Image (cartoon, grey):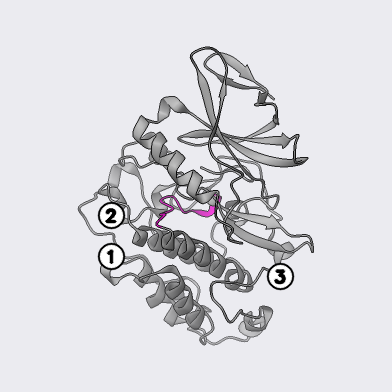
Amino acid sequence: MRLWRYGHAIEHLGQRYHLEGFLGSGGMADVCLAWDEQEKREVVIKVIKPDELDQRALDRFVQEATQIAQWHHPNILHIYGDLASESIDQTQAVPYIVMEYAQGGDLQKRLNPGQPYPLSAILSIFPQLCSAISHAHKQGIIHRNLKPPNVLFRILPDDTEQAVVSDFGLAIEVDAAHYTYARGSMLPYMAPEQLRGQTLPASDIFALGVILYQLCTGRLPFRRTLLDLRPDEPLKPPLSPSLLQPLLPRELDEVIFTALADDLAQRFSDAIQFWENARTALLSPPARSSHIHQFSFRSALSFPDDPMQPAVSDCSRSARGEKQEENADTELEGGDVENPPGSVQ
């Protein structure tokens, strides 16, 4: 394949990476599948759009990418080294970053509008997301753009899966009118303070709350467009999850609404606290008793004693999405747009 920058066709980056395919495009980068000639493996390369970033944003990108490349957390996508740059003429250079290729695709592709995710899979995947977010916050990094397309699946040697979070710290901070938001993929997961230009660790807790609501109900809690966003107005409370899905415990309503609170002080203090409360709620009796609940997910997963080391999903194949349509226009309620497998925005 060829990627165009400044009128030049790029097939290789350095002497090491050969571009194989185009995975998607975000507000700050194009994402390509590439072959690493040195390590003999497929990788994902995020080719930065330098004309979309001012120097301050690019400097922050380099600083955080360098820090994240040193992490070795099982639920965070690996970054292979620092930001590099390929000169294509005497005046222009293309900055890029090389990352792990997660062959299991992304969570967005596995979601079916109106259908809740398998509860056994929720109990496996969600603690892994919380573990990743908790680790990042302890390192002083905020994700800023947590959403299902940035939740990927690593295939392990035994053919099981591990959920990994991508794009840590790599999302640019822009105002609500920026075209990245206008695409709709980020809006449903944005905390109220982000609309006011402030991003905090609690903003990631809010995004986790949206994801858990979506997994449990098959719907997004908020329907948002740029036209009706009012940063100074509180969000209208969503319907209770247990009303949408009567087999969900009512205790889960309070847990999710705590994560989605307008007041930052009312949200969970960290992601692990959120997971511990969510697990207790999910294992509670359903709001409405039914023989249908006999499929009980409680025995489908053995939980780790250490919440920072969540179990690997053992339901990978059943949850791996028979749907898998390659249609970028398919939307979940609330305007979230699908992205290609392995994409990071």
Residue 342, visible in the rendered structure: yes
Q: Which mark is residue 303?
A: none
Q: Residue drawn 43% across and 43% down?
A: 63
Q: Is residue 255 magenta?
A: no
Count neighbours of disc 1 (C-alpha within 10 A) and say few if under 14, some if 14 to 19, many if 20 or more. many
Name the image quarter holding residue 107.
Answer: bottom right
Q: Residue 245's x, y, as percent?
A: 50, 73
In this rendering, would 202 be left or right of 244? left
Q: Nearer the viewer, residue 238 or 143?
A: 143
Count neighbours of disc 2 (C-alpha within 10 A) and say few if under 14, some if 14 to 19, many if 20 or more. some
Q: Residue drawn 59% across and 15% down?
A: 8
Q: Residue drawn 46% across and 65% down?
A: 134
Which residue is the site of mark 2?
Answer: 193
Question: Three-letter amino acid code at disc 1?
Answer: Leu
Q: Earlier in the sequence, mark 2 or mark 1?
A: 2
Question: Three-letter amino acid code at disc 2?
Answer: Glu
**Count of numbered circles in the view:** 3
Q: Residue 132's x, y, as percent?
A: 52, 62
Question: Three-letter amino acid code at disc 3?
Answer: Asp
Name the image quarter holding residue 120.
Answer: bottom right
Q: Is residue 143 magenta?
A: yes
Q: Nearer the viewer, residue 249 or 160?
A: 160
Which residue is the site of mark 3?
Answer: 314
Label 1 to label 3: alpha-carbon separation: 35 Å
Which residue is the site of mark 1?
Answer: 264
Label 2 to label 1: alpha-carbon separation: 9 Å
Read off the magenta span: 140-149
Q: Secondary structure at mark 1?
A: helix
Label 3 to label 2: alpha-carbon separation: 37 Å
Name above or below for residue 263 compared with residue 94.
Answer: below
> Image quadrant for the N terminus?
top right
